[in-house]
Amino acid sequence: MSELMACHECDLLTRLPELPPGGRAHCPRCGCLLQRDRPNSIEKTLALSFAGLVLFIVAVSFPFLAMKAGGFEQHSNLLTGVWLLLEQKMVLLAMVVLLTCVLFPLAGILGLLYVLLPLHFGRRLPRAEVVFRLVSHLQPWSMMEVFMLGILVSLVKLGHLAEVIPGISLWAFAVLIFVLAAQTAVLDHHQVWERLEALR
């Protein structure tokens, strides 16, 4: 891969210097941050991806919420929530929830594992570049935090109508949001592209 990089803000083509540990490279014209040294970025991202996968499995496998009212108790999980939206004829909303809160985050986690795990061992799987590019495009469409905010608002509104019992899935989902945010923060795209190019 070339050491030239286009500035994200002003499009100036700049040759990146060798960065010292913890160093940063800025655009000489506008001062925008171009590159930051992230030590062990691939290993940290891998660890967070494995943690995210475990939390994701817990989040979709166990009860999300339970509601008690008048001797009646109903449990639901993430996928039954999508199914209930479909039963209420809210197909578009059900698809948005399914895609942005279940499928896109899962695809992002699995895609990173597909690319980064072989890289950690000095290998490269077929079409790794395509998968990594797809993961980068999907990342902005993962809206789990918006879904979580909606749940919190619903809990406040339903609190005086019924007893709402958070399930283990809700806590796993909340932790998963922070794990995925940390994963995004530690991932060094430039380093991944360099390693993929070197293994061609």
Image: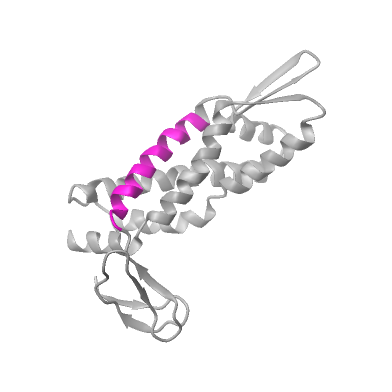
Which stretch did the figure color magenta?
Answer: 39-59
Q: Magenta includes 58?
A: yes
For the point 26% across and 69% down, which residue is it? 20
Question: In front here: 87 or 182?
Answer: 182
Q: Quadrant of residue 36?
A: bottom left
Residue under the point 35% across and 83% down: 13
Q: Which residue is situated farthest in the top direction here? A: 71
Rendered position, 103 above or below 191? above
- Relative to 94, 132 lies left or right: left
Is residue 148 toward the left or the right of residue 107 in the image? right
Question: Residue 90: image x %, image y %?
Answer: 70, 41
Residue 125, can we see it? no
Using the image, determine if residue 55 lies above or below residue 41: above
| Horizontal and vertical percent position of residue 29 | 42, 86
Q: Residue 71: which quarter of the image?
A: top right
The answer to whether any part of residue 161 appears in the image is: yes
Q: Quadrant of residue 200?
A: bottom left
Nearest the eye: 93 or 52: 52
Q: Main secondary structure of the magenta part?
A: helix
Which quadrant, please, contains the N terminus?
bottom left
Q: Residue at x 81, y 15 (%)?
A: 70
Task: Give how far across and how far down residue 35 sits, in percent.
Answer: 36, 70
Residue 175, magenta (yes or no): no
